Image (cartoon, rainbow, N blue to C red):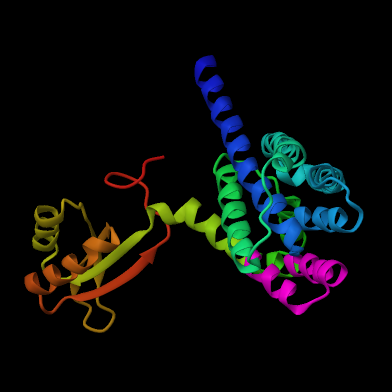
């Protein structure tokens, strides 16, 4: 048991270091010189750096302290401790390691793309270890508890906008910087989601048919995919039908679709996107 805990701790620390390095490079080496406004607490810390030269990592820690104090009960002890460790490691890398690396000073669009991709990848690595370095995440959770009627997406959007708009006005004071800031925020969100959930993305087929057993057997023989037969009943005819549920990769779905129509031309097929598929034949927890 102690050995397993030690291994998990080492994985957490490695994720914090590597993820923190990606975030630090994205923010310090790509965004700071180009004067991009960034979302979140790191975006506020970047404003202090660009206006007064204050260290980004140190300011990130100081700005997160009141957020931590206000949301500690909501976060839970385990997530709270992990997040403190992640923020300390990332902030150290931001202030000590990142300045030793070269700063990109060429095309601003490329700088924005690199900032968004690197930061998003770094956040994803840390999120996947049940931790966080983004104080705005804690604020989002607190607002969600107090205002449950608000969607998570709308809360995140307005919090990000509340940092990006003043950042663009106080530092760069041009419309291009505002647009770049919005692009970076969108990229961070997309890259984080893709790395956390997109790796195991797939398709789900729901087939309403009278030949459920035959379809399952053919899918298994042709593609090596298992299926589940559910009992269904038509709302109009009241006739009993098999509802075959099959999860597969995107590449396999085209072949499965053709196969289903060959086995039962009268079947009813619904194909849906799946953001995450975990189990036999896919990723395992």
| Residue 25 shown in magenta | no
Q: Relative to 29, is 156 above or below?
A: below
Secondary structure mostly seen in magenta is helix
- Taking the spot 43% from the left edge, 56% from the top edge, the residue there is 198
The x, y position of residue 59, in whole percent, is: 85, 46
Left or right, 279 with respect to 231, comes to: right
- Taking the spot 84% from the left edge, 69% from the top edge, the residue there is 166
Q: Is residue 104 visible?
A: yes
- Taking the spot 79% from the left edge, 77% from the top edge, the residue there is 174
Q: Is residue 154 visible?
A: no
The x, y position of residue 265, in whole percent, is: 10, 78
Quarter of image, res 237: bottom left
Q: Which quarter of the image is occupied by the C terminus?
A: top left
- Taking the spot 46% from the left edge, 54% from the top edge, the residue there is 197
Please report the bounds of the magenta region as a residue range: 159-185
The x, y position of residue 5, in whole percent, is: 55, 22
Left or right, 204 with respect to 38, comes to: left
Residue 83 or residue 175, whichever sits in front? 175
Left or right, 12 with respect to 278, comes to: right
């Amino acid at each position: 048991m102690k050995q397993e805990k030690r291994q998990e701790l080492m994985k957490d620390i490695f994720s914090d270091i590597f993820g923190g390095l990606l975030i630090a490079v994205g923010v310090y080496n790509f965004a700071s010189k180009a004067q991009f406004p960034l979302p979140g607490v790191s975006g506020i810390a970047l404003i202090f750096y660009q206006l007064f030269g204050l260290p980004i990592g140190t300011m990130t820690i100081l700005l997160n302290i009141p957020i931590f104090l206000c949301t500690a009960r909501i976060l839970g002890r385990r997530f709270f401790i992990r997040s403190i460790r992640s923020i300390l490691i990332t902030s150290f890398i931001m202030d000590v390691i990142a300045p030793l690396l070269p700063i990109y000073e060429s095309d601003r669009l490329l700088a924005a793309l690199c900032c968004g991709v690197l930061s998003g990848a770094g956040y994803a690595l840390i999120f996947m270890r049940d931790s966080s370095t983004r104080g705005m995440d804690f604020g989002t959770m607190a607002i969600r508890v107090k205002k449950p009627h608000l969607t998570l997406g709308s809360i995140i959007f307005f919090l990000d906008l509340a940092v990006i708009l003043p950042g663009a006005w106080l530092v760069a004071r041009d419309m291009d910087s505002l647009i770049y800031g919005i692009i970076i925020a969108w990229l961070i969100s997309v890259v984080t989601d893709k790395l956390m959930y997109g790796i195991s993305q797939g398709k789900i087929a729901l087939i309403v048919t009278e030949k459920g057993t035959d379809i399952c057997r053919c899918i298994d023989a042709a593609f090596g995919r298992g299926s589940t037969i559910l009992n269904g009943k038509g709302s109009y005819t009241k006739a009993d039908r098999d509802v075959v549920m099959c999860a597969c990769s995107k590449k396999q779905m085209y072949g499965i679709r053709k196969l289903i129509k060959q086995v039962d031309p009268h079947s009813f097929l619904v194909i849906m996107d799946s953001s995450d598929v975990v189990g036999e034949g896919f990723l395992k927890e």
